[in-house]
Image: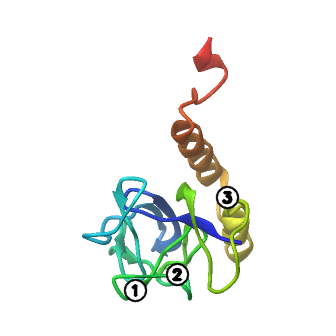
């Protein structure tokens, strides 16, 4: 089953720390100059992402889909700092190779994977960020109170 394709501006989380300062993560900064997904440049392995410390880079991607000769990045793929991409284009799904199409699982579990890897991490801010990002992409209010 495919995972939502990552693009410039899609977020990643970073569990790394510099001393007591958490890196947190941020948006993907660089992408393909000629391949667009949902109107945004496609992210690939090696592309940069914002981080509090030195910039992070996308470490893993699809083994079956290449964009400009680099593996395509997707929701749940890892970064060099040990983090994960937590957002992607819900209408473009990228798999790992061979096989047919399928429905969208929306890559659920990326945040849970990060929690298992870094159990002391305060995941509240990441799940909140993911919920706000999802609500924004669906064109919905961020919370029920805001809609009243």
Q: Is residue 59 above or below residue 73?
A: below
At mark 1, the secondary structure is: strand
Q: To which residue does mark 1 refer? A: 70
Residue 112: quadrant of the picture? bottom right
Q: Residues within 10 Å of mark 3 (few under 14, many from 20)?
A: some
Residue 62: percent from the left, percent from the top?
55, 82
CB atoms of marks 1 and 3 within 8 Å: no
Looking at the image, the residue that sits furthest to the top is 148
Q: To which residue does mark 3 refer? A: 106
Q: Earlier in the sequence, mark 2 or mark 3?
A: 2
Q: Is residue 77 above or below residue 86?
A: below
Residue at (60% x, 17% y) in the render: 147
Q: Of the numbered discs in the image, which one, if any, rests on residue 61?
A: 2
The answer to whether 18 appears left or right of 133 in the picture is: left
**In-front residue for pair 119/148:** 148
Residue 131: quadrant of the picture? top right
CB atoms of marks 1 and 2 within 8 Å: yes
Q: Is residue 119 visible?
A: no
Residue at (48% x, 84% y) in the render: 59
């Amino acid at each position: 089953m495919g995972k939502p394709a990552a693009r410039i501006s899609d977020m990643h989380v970073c569990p790394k720390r510099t001393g007591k300062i958490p890196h947190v993560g941020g948006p993907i900064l660089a992408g393909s100059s000629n391949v667009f997904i949902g109107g945004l440049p496609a992210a690939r392995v090696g592309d940069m992402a914002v981080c509090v410390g030195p910039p992070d880079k996308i470490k893993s991607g699809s083994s079956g889909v290449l964009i400009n000769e680099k593996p395509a990045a997707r929701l749940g793929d890892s970064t060099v700092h040990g983090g994960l991409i937590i957002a992607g284009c819900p209408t473009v799904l990228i798999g790992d190779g061979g096989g047919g199409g399928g429905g969208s699982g929306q890559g659920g579990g990326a945040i849970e994977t990060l929690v298992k890897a870094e159990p002391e991490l305060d995941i509240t801010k990441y799940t909140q960020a993911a919920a706000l990002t999802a609500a924004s992409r669906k064109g919905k209010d961020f919370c029920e109170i805001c809609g009243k």
